[in-house]
């Protein structure tokens, strides 16, 4: 069985975890002397040993650093419209598993919600952290507070999921620059929003002949990138 993975602020010769993570190690029946893996969420990962474990803290000592973590050649950002209920949590979890480096929440004309509370944003960030542990990534995606679509900026390529487009993402994708993929809410983006994005250099791409739900479209776009084998 693979060692349990623990998120830390930074890799250091000695790392102290608080009560929440200490309780989790207790639940896993780990003891002093057991081996774990630590990662900082920014790509660094190493082995570690549980040096001390009680109800209030866990102290880990750093072991051998690990290399070869699987990430895309350029960072991939998912820009996604605000969705109702737990749909965003499902999207963030899948995006983490599929290799996204960042999730940018958006307020669009037809968005299911206009804002997100601080506690829900914190929960989404914890979902990303737990998903990065489960999927054995050394990178935990940033989950960024929502911005209006008109204020979205990006570096490199932006691909917008748009029904009726004939371009396929995999035909236009280049790993020379960072990649952003964007999906709208239930009901889609307004035509004017798509036109504005294209005017700023975005490329509209197809997700196939079927209409996908708002929580499925991001997974389809990121899945197309994963299918390239990077």
Image (cartoon, rainbow, N blue to C red):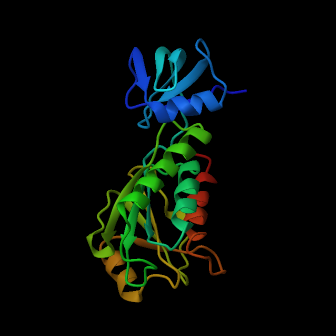
Q: Nearer the viewer, residue 220 or 39?
A: 39
Residue farthest along the right direction in this orientation: 1
Name the residue at 28% across, 75% down.
Answer: 150
Q: Nearer the viewer, residue 53 or 212?
A: 53
Residue at 37% in and 28% down: 10
Q: Is residue 178 left or right of residue 53?
A: left
Nearer-the-camera pick, 7 or 54: 54
Classify residue 206 by image quadrant.
Answer: bottom right
230 above or below 211?
above
For residue 74, say whether it is visible: yes
In the rendered image, which quarter contains the C terminus? top right
Looking at the image, which residue is at 58% across and 61% down?
90
Q: Where's residue 35, x and y in %?
A: 60, 17
Residue 170 visible at all: no
Q: Does residue 4 sit above or below 94 in this rendering? A: above
- Look at 63% across and 22% down and name the residue there: 30
The image shows residue 172 at horizontal and vertical percentages of 49, 63
Seen in the picture, residue 33 relative to 4 is either above or below; the reply is above
């Amino acid at each position: 069985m693979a060692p349990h993975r623990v998120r830390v602020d930074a890799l250091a010769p000695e790392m102290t975890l608080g009560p929440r993570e200490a309780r989790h190690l207790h639940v896993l029946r780990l003891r002093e002397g057991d081996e774990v893996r630590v990662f900082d969420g920014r790509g660094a990962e190493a082995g570690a040993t549980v040096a001390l474990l009680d109800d209030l803290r866990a102290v880990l000592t750093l072991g051998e650093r690990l290399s070869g973590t699987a990430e895309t050649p350029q960072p991939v950002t998912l820009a996604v419209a605000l969705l109702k209920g737990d749909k965003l949590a499902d999207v963030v979890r899948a995006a983490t598993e599929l290799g996204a480096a960042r999730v940018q929440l958006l307020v669009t004309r037809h968005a299911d919600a206009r804002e997100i509370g601080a506690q829900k944003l914190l929960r989404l960030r914890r979902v990303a952290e737990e998903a990065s542990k489960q999927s054995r990534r050394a990178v935990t995606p940033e989950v960024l507070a929502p911005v209006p679509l008109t204020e979205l900026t990006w570096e490199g390529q932006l691909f917008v999921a748009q029904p009726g487009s004939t371009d396929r993402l995999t035909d236009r994708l280049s790993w020379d620059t960072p990649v952003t993929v964007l999906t709208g809410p239930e009901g889609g983006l307004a035509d004017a929003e798509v036109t504005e994005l294209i005017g700023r250099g975005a490329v509209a791409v197809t997700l196939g002949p079927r209409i996908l739900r708002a929580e499925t479209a991001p997974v389809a776009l990121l899945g197309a990138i994963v299918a390239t084998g990077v």
